[in-house]
Image: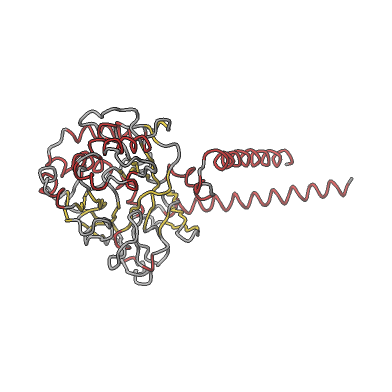
Amino acid sequence: MSAIMRWCCNVFFVVAILLGGLLAFHFGVSCVKDECNLKFALQIFLHRHMPVVHHYRTRSLGEFMRLYTGDGYKSRFDTDFLEVKQTSANQSVADRAYQNFMRRDTPNGTQDASSARFRPFLDGMSKMSMAERLRRYHPKEHCVWNYHVGNTRKEAPAFSPEGQGVRECRSYFLTAQLRLVFMEHLILEAYINASTVLGVDHFVMYADDRVLAINTTFAPYSDAGVLEIHPLYAPHAPYFRVPNISTFWLALIDADEYLVPPSSFLSMRDYLMPLTVWPRDGSRSVKQIHCMYKQFGSSGLEDKLPNVSDLTAFTQRDTHLAMNGKSVALYDAIDLEHSNTMPHELRLKDDFSQDTTSLLLNLGAVVAFQDAGGRLQIRFKHLAAGQEAVLGLCFVQIIVSLALYFILRRFCRCCARSSRESS
């Protein structure tokens, strides 16, 4: 028995050393500034289980200069906008843009080709007609079984056998809301194509009059019902108004950002479907996910080849993940009566204000997440008939294992005490 106990202690010791080494590396080498905290360390270790936002903040040098030196940007190219602290008064727009490009690029970053898994789907989409795309990626309705809605937890109806088989259907499953600024019409088509492959099935775009005047870019998508176009109602508040729309999830996003599912999923729909729940017993569940940024640069490209997606063209990013990401929220939990205060996170109804998470582990039957108040929440899915026995067996195994552990520990202590008394 002593040999077994020593082996267990050695295993525990090795695990502790590995975990301690990872934390020491994070706090001593990897993290910077406000990222040096335990919560961010856990996010780094577990982010493979959460979606991230791929932010292509420069693209290639040629694309960046075309986007940021157009006529629509001349009035915005002041020092604050370019985030360049020292510029001369007679510096040209092109010089400022290039200086900003150099500041935002990642020449010594980390190679990240995780988006390569979407290449076959992107290539296939390029050969599809609009009718084929609609059949493949934009069904007329999306349905979720046993989905009940209430404005508060107490309003959610209690579960009953009669409630089984009830389904909720919406026009869309995941909607992306974005603001398009001038010159970004050049990248809109590529953005819609890639985001569609990633699982977004509807787009709501806010744009000013200059962008709306260039309607040839938008017409095929708006005519097909894939894209809704609205005038920009406030130049400095692009995300404050949430539209009334028949969707399950809503994401705040920009035209240079893509919501990418974890590596074990091929679309955000597949990832979000198990989380599309409204607990019947009023218990806690995830209502909003805050996704960290992966900041991509130019990857050394002077100019990107046409008809090549950002997802596959750029593979070099900042080494560190940025906590200042974007959010995707369950639409029924969003507070539609009050405006948002920031574009990175949606305002939820009062009763669900703590149900935002940036740390989530989805184990299928069990979902564990840290809420906005820092508390750990664990939710058990309602399983289909026949699966309860499997989950019950898992619990029995856990209980039996714990019981054996305590029995063995007690037995070893008794043996050790008897040995000492006999000596």
The residue positioned 17% from the left and 56% from the top of the image is 231
Corner quadrant of residue 169: bottom left
Tell me: residue 184, above or below residue 329.
Answer: above
Judged from this view, the residue extending furthest toward the bottom is: 154
300 with respect to 408 (left or right): left
**Could you say which is closer to the camera, residue 400 or residue 12?**
12
Corner quadrant of residue 10: top right
Q: Is residue 232 visible?
A: yes
Judged from this view, the residue extending furthest toward the right is: 423
Look at the image and tell me in which quarter the N terminus lies.
Answer: top right
Q: Position of residue 173 (x, y in %)?
A: 25, 53
Q: Position of residue 213 (x, y in %)?
A: 11, 48
Look at the image and tell me in which quarter the C terminus lies.
Answer: top right
Q: Position of residue 79 (x, y in %)?
A: 33, 45
**Could you say which is closer to the camera, residue 216 or residue 282?**
216
421 with respect to 327 (left or right): right
> What colour scheme has been applied to the protein in the rendered image?
secondary structure
Q: Is residue 163 visible?
A: no
